[in-house]
Image (cartoon, rainbow, N blue to C red):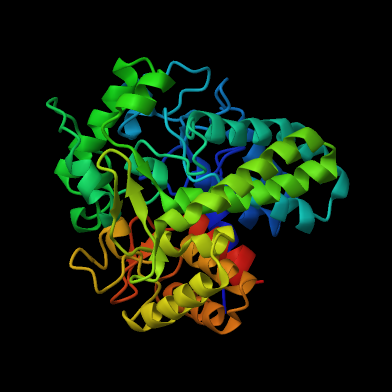
Amino acid sequence: MIDVEAARKVLRANDRGGHTVPTDGLYPFAWSWDSAITALGWLTFDEARAWDECHTMFSGQWDNGMVPHILFHGGNAESYFPGPDVWGSNTAIPSSAISQPPVWATAIRMMAERAQDRALAESALAKLMPQLIAYHDWWYNDRDRADTGLVRSYHPWESGMDNSPAWDTPLMRVPEVEWEYQRRDLGHVDQDQRPHKPEYDRYLYLVDFYKKNGFDSDIIYNECPYRVVDIGIVAILQRATKDLVVLCRQTGHHAAAERMEGEIDRTQSAIDKLWSPGHRCFFNYDLVADEPLEEVTTGTVLPLFGGLAGEQQAADMAKLLDEWIDASPFAVASTHPSSPRYEPQRYWRGPIWLHINWMLALGLRDYGYDDVADRVNGATRACVDASGFFEYFDAESGAGCGGGDFSWTAAVALYWLAD
């Protein structure tokens, strides 16, 4: 059984008044997709606080519509690296200069449909709808200028799956920074659970690239040394845009709904270019090298969540996931255990993440694979039963990894596992 009160206690402890930090110390500010998922946890026992989470994140939306992946609200900027001085974005609320998987419209639709306080929900939607529409317009206008149907990403951090082995090849093309810096994460978490220094050097080179080029979208679109089609972002955006269309129709934003339906169709028409029959999943794509990134990760089966798979593709991915659960003692490992680059406890190179399991289970149910979805649910409960509310979990031992008392883990437990 999920300890509901313990999960609520995690959210209360991480509450900073309008935004929830992922965990104390390691992540002392507000992260975009963390906040979206955490809002669902708040919804189960404090609806007003859940809507505050949404409003706080969108208060940092850029003029062009982007919602940054980090908002540096309050706190000590020196406690996190890279902080606002490194990003140099010069926004009213200090922020990073990239986004994160756009799960917001999906979370907000779920909140609106489950809300008991209808007046509060309608008031929140009235404010949030123009912001959500602008956010999705930014993704399609800024990140898919050629109307391919496949938005692009400029940084592994933007994927939310920071050091996934899927990014190893395109990241190797990025130079390493030559200036010295002091990481803060290693003061909170064992280095065996975090990205290596050469990867971090390249992450920071990209941050420098954006800043040195004045965040010019044209330059970044054409010249950024890291440009990939991230299938996880594409899938999450597809589902979120479908959810946004429903919200638009309900709230009278009909022109935006029609525009978004066109984007949905464009992505659906393009997705088969990324399908790999031999691997039974969709692959990410390196736009600079013009080649697929052949690594099987939980991101490569997220088209189930996005409703992008055809019937046979869905059947193939459901069978793959059924086998995947058997491939490690705890599941679903974020990199398939058969990969030579699988590491069961190092960040996104193998450990289990509850919010990804939740997305996979939702997608499996949408396609009628309730039996496999039940297995994902059971495997997810096993992680919480073994170790509590950690950031992620060792796929071999079930041990908690990364930050403890983690907000989105507690939120997923409240919204999904305890429901």
Is 326 positioned to the left or the right of 167 in the image? right
Judge from the rendering whether residue 111 lies leftward or rightward of residue 150; answer left or right: right
State the image quarter where residue 214 is shown: top left
Q: Residue at x 42, y 29 (%)?
A: 96
Q: Can residue 12 be seen?
A: no
In the rendered image, the vertical position of residue 36 relative to residue 341, given as above or below: above
- Which quadrant, please, contains the C terminus? bottom right
Where residue 152 sits in the image (x, y, percent)? 42, 39
- In this rendering, the count of numbered labels is 0
Residue at horizontal 48 percent and vertical 67 percent from the top: 357
Q: Nearer the viewer, residue 162 or 272?
A: 272
In the rendered view of the protein, which quadrant contains the N terminus? bottom right
As rendered, which of 363 and 288 lies closer to the eye? 288
- Residue 269 visible within the image: yes
Q: On the picture, is 55 further left or further right than 10?
A: right
Q: Position of residue 264 (x, y in %)?
A: 62, 47
Residue at the image point whose x is 49% and y is 54% from the top = 271
- Give x and y (percent) for residue 12: 58, 51
